[in-house]
Amino acid sequence: MESSQDWDGVEGAYVMVFDNYKQFYIGQSEDIRKRIKKHWTARKPFDRLIFGSLYNSVFPVDEFRALDNTRIYAARSRNPYTVEERAEKAANQRFSLNRMAGGETDPYALMVALSIPRDRNHELATISLSYEDYEEAWQEIANLVSQAGVSPRRDLVAQLADTDMTIYAVRRDVGGPFMWSRRDSVRGAAARGELSVKEYSDFLTAIGERIVWPD
């Protein structure tokens, strides 16, 4: 697609490519241009509360913006669901932002698909960690927070940000391993009210995160 105006009011299927992230999204619409522009302007601020963890959920396409979208391919079709389904089935799921199978669906199938969204193994470079070592590392964060005293706790944020943020695959006696990092424990402390909003936001900034506050 060289100009989105050429696809104004056109029915068909499309592929949005995000080269810098090695991701793509396949969709269909009765108006391709309108649908793509909607992707660029939509937001999903509560997405992580609904669609799984940071380690296995599929990132929402609507959180990407127009400048993230490096290439777009489109095909005219009177039956865009068929084109979408064929393209989605042929795609490598490792790079796909599609959370459910392509093609036409009924309300019941849609409800089931949304209740059990796709997830995937992001093939993170994890390091194996025993459950005993996990408990010790978790306690390390708990001790930093509990021993920091009362506000103002100027050194606490720096101490938390300076801890090892490696992502581990924690081994347990029953069940498979689970992903964890000390960042998860800091987030848990904030959720329990042991860290203030400012302390947690300062922590995220210190480890290089960019916070986007809701309007």
Image (cartoon, grey):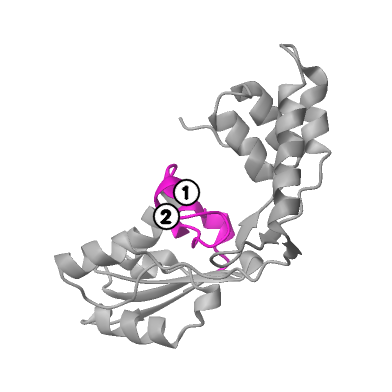
Q: Nearer the viewer, residue 197 or 105?
A: 197
Q: Nearer the viewer, residue 210 or 181?
A: 181
Q: Quadrant of the C terminus?
A: top left
Where are the magenta residues, as a range? Answer: 44-71
Q: Quadrant of residue 145?
A: top right
Does residue 43 show up? no
Decide whether residue 52 is among the magenta residues.
Answer: yes
- Residue 182: % across, % down: 71, 45
Task: Identify the amino acid type marked 2.
Answer: Phe
Decide whether residue 107 is among the magenta residues.
Answer: no
14 relative to 140 in the view: left or right: left
Give the vertical position of 187 relative to 17 (above or below): above
Give the vertical position of 45 relative to 97 (above or below): above
SS state under label 1: helix
Residue that mark 1 sits on: 48
Residue that mark 2 sits on: 51
145 relative to 38 in the view: left or right: right
The answer to whether mark 1 and mark 2 are in CB contact below 8 A is yes
Task: Identify the amino acid type marked 1.
Answer: Arg
Does residue 135 show up? yes
